[in-house]
Image: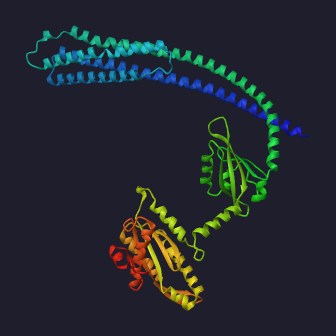
């Protein structure tokens, strides 16, 4: 009973290869017909180009005849001045037209290239044709210059009729027309020769293509037989791998090089509540899918790599997985497949997140704490020189906060700090970051301002935030304000401690002036308050 599926699969495989063979043979025959059509079309196109050049030469010959007719009429007749001028103009125009046609024909012939190598006879004819056309310049120029000079002398008084010889003029004209006649013969011979060589080339290509088609059929038959032998081995290996994958507790996914899922171990069902669909992109199940999948591919092009990623469970929450991604090499340099072997680390990641919050966020207000402030400042100060920007450090101290604790109690003070922290974060959003660095003292790091006026506007908003009444302790009202001291980097210090000291002195000055004031550190502040306690 176990052998029936394998037999059925083998039959399907044979039918598939038979269909592929028929398809390949059909494609080959269609390609053969298309090749024949293409070669015929190319031959017709080449013949048409040659015929076009022949027409240009014939027309040039006709223009020369018209020019000679105008010349002889002018030289042999007693004409009025107006008739002579018209004949002279006809002579010049027909010669110019013939010269233009010859130039076009010569350019066209020079650009002609045989479509196949080995067409030696047609190449010789083409070379001879080019030489004939190139050699026409001198006799044509002599004919044109002689005619122009004679007609110019005829127009002047004192013309000597004996200086004109019709025989000499005809000889000059014939020196031009003889190469034209030879060019026509060479073009005709070239066209016939190219047609014959095309036929020979086509016969050779058809014979070669037929041989290729026959060998292709033999190769397909061989591959079909080879595939049937290999399939039985693959079926045995597949059964073994499937048994291993289904009994492992780890989570295994096999994808192709584009991230399409090829296999998913059943263990995913207990973790996610479903099995990712075979044939669907792995990125459909990964958070930040584009970034994550690109990262997974880039880091494992040569060796296995362990990465952390999140997959969506059936109930919508995200499950953290520590995943070893291993490339399975194909025939080329790019991996043909990727194998992902994962284990769940959700609890570990949650624990790490809690530790991070405890280390860098204030437990009462949930905003960044002093440790986070130090790390934030170090990151800004250590930026490369080309990316450094001006930084403003503002220290804020709540005026009359001790009075709040003494009158309404510490719980009311905690409630006030929580409300203040939320609004403080919102006020500086987009301009910088707020930190609670101890008690009722806050630090605001501003590094997204473009002018002193913008900095003053932000500081005014901070003063207005503090300078109002707060409703706390179930309706109790408390009015506060702030003393703010500001230090600028790098003008007032190049380290965190120097900036803190400068901002602290400026804040002390605000307190001494009664609060509800923001002061910028200066050397005057340093001299006035450096020895004073805060």
Question: For this view, does 220 lie left or right of residue 372?
Answer: right
Q: Looking at this rendering, what residue extends furthest in the right direction?
A: 1
Q: Looking at this rendering, what residue extends furthest in the front direction?
A: 531
Where in the figure is residue 365, as x and y percent of width and height? 57, 76
Q: Is residue 184 visible?
A: no
| Quadrant location of the N terminus in the rendered image | top right
Res. 257 image quadrant: top right
| Quadrant location of the C terminus in the rendered image | bottom left
Q: Looking at this rendering, what residue extends furthest in the top direction?
A: 167
Nearer to us in this view, 44 or 308: 308
Nearer to us in this view, 294 or 77: 294
Q: How many marks?
A: 0
Question: For this view, does 409 lie left or right of residue 325?
Answer: left
Where in the figure is residue 485, as x and y percent of width and height? 41, 76
x 43%, y 76%: residue: 504
Where in the figure is residue 434, as x and y percent of width and height? 50, 72
Where in the figure is residue 56, as x and y percent of width and height? 37, 21
Q: Is residue 117 above or below residue 374?
A: above
Question: For this view, does 282 lie left or right of residue 49?
Answer: right
Q: Is residue 1 above or below residue 308?
A: above
x 55%, y 23%: residue: 39
x 40%, y 23%: residue: 111
Q: Is residue 32 visible?
A: yes
Res. 138 image quadrant: top left
| Color style of the picture | rainbow
């Amino acid at each position: 009973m176990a052998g029936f599926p394998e037999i059925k699969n083998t039959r399907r495989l044979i039918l598939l290869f038979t269909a592929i063979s028929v398809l390949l043979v059909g494609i080959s025959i269609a390609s053969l017909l298309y090749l024949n059509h293409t070669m015929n079309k190319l031959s017709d196109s080449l013949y048409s180009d040659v015929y076009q050049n022949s027409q240009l030469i014939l027309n040039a010959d006709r223009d020369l005849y018209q020019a000679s007719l105008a010349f002889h009429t002018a030289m042999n007749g007693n004409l009025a001045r107006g008739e002579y001028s018209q004949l002279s103009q006809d002579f010049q125009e027909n010669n110019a037209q013939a010269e233009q046609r010859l130039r076009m024909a010569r350019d066209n012939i020079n650009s002609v290239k045989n479509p196949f190598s080995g067409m030696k006879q047609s190449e010789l004819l083409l070379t001879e044709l080019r030489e004939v056309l190139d050699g026409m310049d001198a006799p044509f120029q002599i004919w044109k210059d002689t005619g122009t000079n004679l007609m110019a002398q005829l127009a002047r008084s004192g013309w000597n009729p004996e200086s004109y010889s019709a025989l000499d003029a005809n000889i000059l004209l014939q020196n031009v027309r003889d190469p034209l006649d030879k060019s026509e013969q060479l073009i005709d011979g070239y066209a016939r020769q190219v047609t014959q060589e095309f036929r020979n080339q086509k016969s050779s290509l058809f014979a070669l293509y037929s041989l290729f088609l026959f060998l292709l059929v033999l190769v397909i038959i061989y591959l079909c037989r080879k595939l049937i032998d290999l399939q039985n081995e693959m079926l045995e290996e597949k059964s073994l791998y499937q048994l291993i994958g289904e009994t492992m507790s780890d989570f295994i996914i096999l994808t192709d090089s584009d991230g399409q899922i090829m296999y998913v171990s059943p263990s995913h069902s207990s973790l996610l509540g479903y099995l990712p669909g075979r044939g669907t992109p792995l990125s459909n199940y990964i958070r930040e899918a584009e970034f994550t999948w690109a990262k997974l591919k880039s880091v494992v092009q040569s060796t296995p790599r362990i990465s952390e990623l999140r997959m969506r469970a059936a109930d919508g929450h995200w499950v953290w997985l520590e995943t070893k991604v291993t490339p399975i090499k194909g025939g080329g340099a790019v991996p043909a497949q990727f194998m992902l072997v994962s284990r769940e680390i959700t609890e570990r990641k949650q624990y790490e997140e809690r530790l991070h919050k405890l280390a860098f966020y204030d437990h009462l207000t949930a905003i960044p704490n002093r440790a986070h402030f130090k790390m934030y400042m170090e990151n800004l100060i250590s930026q490369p020189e080309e990316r450094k920007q001006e930084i403003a450090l503002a220290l804020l101290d709540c005026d009359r906060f001790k009075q709040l604790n003494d009158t309404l109690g510490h719980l009311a003070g905690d409630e006030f700090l929580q409300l203040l922290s939320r609004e403080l974060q919102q006020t500086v959003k987009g301009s910088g970051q707020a930190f609670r660095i101890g008690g009722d003292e806050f630090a605001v790091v501003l590094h997204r301002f473009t002018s002193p006026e913008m900095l003053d506007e932000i500081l005014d908003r901070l003063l207005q935030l503090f300078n109002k009444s707060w409703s706390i302790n179930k309706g109790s009202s408390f009015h506060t304000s702030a003393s703010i001291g500001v230090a600028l980097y790098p003008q007032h210090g190049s380290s965190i401690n120097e900036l803190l000291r400068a901002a602290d002195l400026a804040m002390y000055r605000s307190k001494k002036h009664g609060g509800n004031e923001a002061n910028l550190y200066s050397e005057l502040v340093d001299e006035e308050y450096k020895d004073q306690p805060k």
